Image (spheres, rainbow, N blue to C red):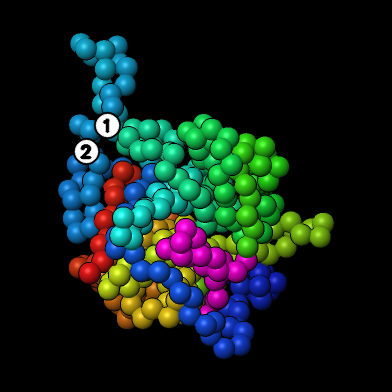
């Protein structure tokens, strides 16, 4: 991926893992009539963005004012909070039945909850929380969620490795240890932790958690210099095996796939979702693709080529995708590309 960006052990650990055995019998993911994905946390907010394609933008005029004594009426508009993290509210509808899932929670304890409140959403609608992986910029808002809902026994679906102690060890720089999730604390706050490595169907079979993603491309090799504490020592952990995605099948359109950071590789994730379900059409891919920075710029072009081949109808590279990759994807797939912003709701209906 780049010259000199990993030790021999790291390089070995980052190689794609062969798919074991024959393809899994297709998982029967029930088609839905509509899915609405609302961005609660992302790296950008733009109050002047227009609606485009399936994207419906939050308007400043609809967001509650806050106290500000320097203005004549003592109040002002603030819009929504942007921060380096990701969180989305996913609501599916099949017939007259709707289900709602919270996917990731952002980076700060209050950011996701603040935006949730300002958007006028009802936290009581959330039936389950799914964490894409254990990094703090996706799990930081769990405390705010508890404050929104109270200790109500909400299920939290995770991969078993989300509790891993991790750090970045870049040569010639001090090691940076990341915050580590505490299972006991989350359970004490009323969350019911459910651990699974395998794919899982949720809520009447209308949503799928991929579980561990098969690594089948030769260019998506994970996160260099990322390590995990195992058996009393730091070891290379470029693959971040707890990375998982959320999948919905929109009737007559194909799959909509939501990623957190895409550490498993955005192409790997999309292909794996198609393989798991037996659905042959990628309708939409939204979320972080992690293509920013010098280590990842060399894989922008093969990623773009793969998405041109898959030809999604909607492509929303957010969070950690990076501006260079976003611009390249916008140029290569102009009819599919939609810029994201906090407060945007993507409404995708079936036929």
Q: Is residue 262 visible?
A: no
Q: Nearer the viewer, residue 88 or 238?
A: 88
Q: Which residues are magenta?
A: 197-216
Q: Is residue 166 magenta?
A: no
**Considering the numbered disc 1 on the image, is that residue within a helix, a strand or a loop?**
loop
Residue 210 % position (x, y): 52, 67
Residue 14 % position (x, y): 61, 72
- Image mark for residue 59: 2
Which quarter of the image is occupied by the C terminus? bottom left
Residue 207 % position (x, y): 44, 62
Please say if 18 is above or below 242: below
Q: Residue at x 47, y 33 (%)?
A: 148
Q: Which residue is mark 1?
A: 63
**Considering the numbered disc 2 on the image, is that residue within a helix, a strand or a loop?**
loop
- Compute the Cα span from label 1 to label 2: 7 Å
Asked if residue 226 lies left or right of residue 328, the reply is right
Q: Nearer the viewer, residue 293 or 114?
A: 114
Q: Are marks 1 and 2 in contact (CB under 8 Å)?
A: yes
Q: Residue at x 43, y 80 (%)?
A: 278
Q: Residue at x 45, y 51 (%)?
A: 101
Q: Give the main secondary structure of the magenta stretch.
A: loop
Asked if residue 248 lies left or right of residue 23, the reply is left
Residue 11 % position (x, y): 63, 73
Question: Dot 2: within a 10 Å radius of its alpha carbon, few (fewer than 14), some, or many (20 or more) residues?
Answer: some
């Amino acid at each position: 991926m780049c010259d000199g960006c990993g030790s021999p052990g790291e390089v070995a650990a980052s190689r794609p893992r062969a798919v074991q055995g024959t393809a899994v019998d297709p998982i029967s993911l029930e088609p839905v009539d509509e899915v609405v994905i609302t961005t609660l946390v992302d790296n950008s907010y733009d109050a002047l963005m227009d609606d485009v394609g399936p994207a419906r933008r939050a308007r400043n005029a609809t967001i509650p004012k806050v106290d500000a004594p320097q203005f004549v009426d003592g109040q002002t508009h603030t819009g929504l909070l942007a921060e380096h993290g990701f969180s989305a509210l996913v609501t599916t509808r099949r017939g007259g039945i709707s289900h709602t899932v919270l996917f990731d929670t952002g980076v700060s304890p209050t950011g996701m909850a603040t935006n949730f409140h300002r958007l006028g959403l009802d936290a009581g609608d959330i039936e389950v929380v799914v964490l894409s992986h254990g990094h703090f910029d996706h799990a930081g808002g769990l405390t705010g969620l508890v404050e929104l809902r109270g200790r109500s026994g909400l299920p939290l679906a995770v991969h078993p490795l989300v509790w891993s102690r991790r750090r970045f060890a870049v040569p010639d720089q001090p090691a940076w240890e990341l915050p580590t999730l505490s299972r006991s604390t989350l359970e004490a706050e009323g969350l019911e932790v459910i651990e699974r490595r395998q794919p899982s169907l949720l809520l009447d079979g209308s949503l799928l958690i991929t579980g561990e993603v098969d690594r089948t491309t030769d260019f998506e090799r994970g996160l260099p210099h990322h390590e995990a504490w195992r058996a009393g020592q730091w070891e290379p952990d470029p693959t971040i095996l707890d990375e998982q995605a959320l999948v919905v099948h929109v009737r007559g359109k194909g799959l909509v796939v939501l990623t957190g950071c895409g550490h498993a590789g955005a192409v790997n994730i999309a292909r794996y979702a198609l393989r798991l379900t037996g659905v042959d059409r990628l309708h939409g891919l939204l979320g972080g693709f992690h293509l920013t920075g010098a280590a990842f710029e060399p894989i922008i072009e093969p990623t773009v080529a793969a998405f041109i081949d898959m030809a999604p109808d909607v492509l929303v590279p957010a969070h950690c995708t990076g501006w260079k990759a976003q611009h390249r994807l916008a140029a290569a797939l102009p009819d599919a590309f939609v810029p994201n912003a906090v407060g945007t709701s993507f409404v995708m209906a079936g036929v």
